Image (cartoon, helix red, strand yellow):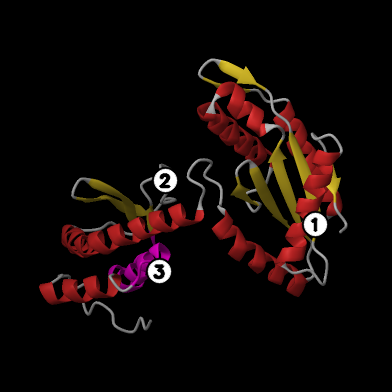
């Protein structure tokens, strides 16, 4: 998309007439990507207002914006009583009344496309995430693993996968009920996340089986992490509505080979998981084939 068309106003003649607002609104409605939307607005109004920066925070982000000694004007964005987040404009000099009026008119044009972008972002998150545990789902796994394999083989960096399965999970459901089983799945997911980096991607492959994709991780690192996860889960009680129990997991490891594709990479992790269960469960196995 070309960014050549700008709001044709200057600091000396700040006004947001209907035509300007219509043009801006049409431009902002051209994308559903949140970052692109904010960038479009920032590119248009930064030269007009001589901004040092423009920051946007989603409704979920409660961190305060620090202007670092500069002047800041911020707005809570609301559309039909729906919170759309906060936007802040920062520069070295104060904003006068005329500039504030201009900003407020401009931000009105942002509300509808921003709402659309947030709803799209939410829909995409639902499409790619498991609704119970919040981790990525199998659909997301297919595309993300393929991309990471390509990057790893192109850059000659290690890549590892863990296949994790809860031992005797059917007994949990049979003894305590499915609501308790759901609580166990969420607790197990929490334990894994407490052991991993933000760059590690966790997927719910199906039922009680999960996969963990570890970039820049060799065999030694994968084994160390897998054992840390196993021990953390084993020693953490799962509690739900007054009931408490401990679970264990079996984990298979696969390290990406030069000739691997997605299927062979995943198959070795799954084979390692199968071998861990066959050997008695609650253990980690690295599969070489």
On the image, the x and y values in percent for residue 56 come to: 37, 56
Quadrant (top left, top right, bottom left, bottom right) of the C terminus: bottom right
Q: Residue tagged by mark 3? A: 36
Residue that appears at 59% across and 65% down: 143
Judged from the image, the secondary structure of the residue bearing numbered disc 3 is helix
In the rendered image, the residue lying farthest to the front is 174
Which of the 4 quarters of the picture holds residue 281?
top right
* Residue at mark 1 to residue at mark 2: CA–CA distance: 40 Å
N-term-proximal mark, 1 vs 2: 2
- Is 131 located above or below residue 89 in the figure? above
Q: Residue tagged by mark 2? A: 61
Mark 1 Cα-neighbour bin, 10 Å: few <14, some 14–19, many ≥20:
many
The tag on residue 32 is none
Q: Is residue 13 visible?
A: no
Q: Are marks 2 and 3 in contact (CB under 8 Å)?
A: no
Mark 3 Cα-neighbour bin, 10 Å: few <14, some 14–19, many ≥20:
some
Quadrant (top left, top right, bottom left, bottom right) of the N terminus: bottom left
Residue that appears at 67% across and 65% down: 148
N-term-proximal mark, 2 vs 3: 3
Which of the two marks, 1 or 2, is nearer to us in this view?
A: 1
Residue that appears at 76% across and 71% down: 153
- Is 283 located above or below residue 197 in the figure? above
Q: Is-magenta flag for residue 50?
A: yes
Residue that appears at 63% across and 27% down: 172
Judged from the image, the secondary structure of the residue bearing numbered disc 2 is loop
Q: Is residue 264 left or right of residue 181?
A: right
Q: Residue tagged by mark 1? A: 268
On the image, the x and y values in percent for residue 249 come to: 73, 36
Q: Which residues are magenta?
A: 31-54
């Amino acid at each position: 998309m070309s960014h050549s068309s700008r709001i044709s106003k200057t600091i000396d003649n700040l006004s947001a007439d209907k035509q300007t607002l219509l043009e801006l609104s049409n431009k902002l409605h051209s994308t559903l990507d949140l970052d692109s939307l904010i960038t479009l607005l920032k590119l248009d109004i930064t030269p007009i207002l001589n901004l040092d920066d423009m920051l946007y925070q989603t409704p979920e982000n409660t961190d305060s914006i620090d202007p670092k000694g500069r002047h800041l004007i911020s707005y809570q964005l609301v559309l039909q009583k729906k919170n759309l987040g906060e936007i802040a404009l920062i520069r070295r000099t104060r904003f006068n009344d005329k500039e504030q009026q201009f900003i407020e008119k401009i931000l009105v044009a942002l509300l509808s496309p921003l709402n659309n972008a947030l709803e799209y972002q939410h829909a995409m998150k639902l499409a790619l995430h498991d609704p119970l545990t919040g981790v990525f789902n199998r659909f997301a796994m297919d595309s993300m693993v393929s991309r990471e394999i390509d990057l790893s083989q192109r850059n000659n960096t290690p890549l590892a996968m863990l296949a994790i399965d809860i031992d005797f999970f059917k007994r949990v459901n049979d003894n305590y009920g499915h609501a308790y089983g759901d609580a166990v799945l969420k607790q197990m997911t929490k334990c894994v996340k407490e052991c991993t980096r933000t760059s590690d991607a966790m997927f719910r492959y199906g039922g009680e089986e999960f996969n963990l994709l570890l970039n820049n991780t060799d065999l030694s690192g994968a084994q160390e992490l897998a054992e840390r996860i196993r021990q953390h889960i084993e020693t953490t009680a799962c509690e739900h509505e007054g009931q408490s129990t401990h679970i264990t997991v079996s984990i298979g490891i696969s390290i990406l080979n030069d000739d691997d594709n997605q299927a062979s990479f995943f198959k070795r992790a799954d084979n390692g998981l199968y071998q861990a269960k066959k050997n008695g469960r609650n253990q980690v196995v690295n599969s070489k084939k």
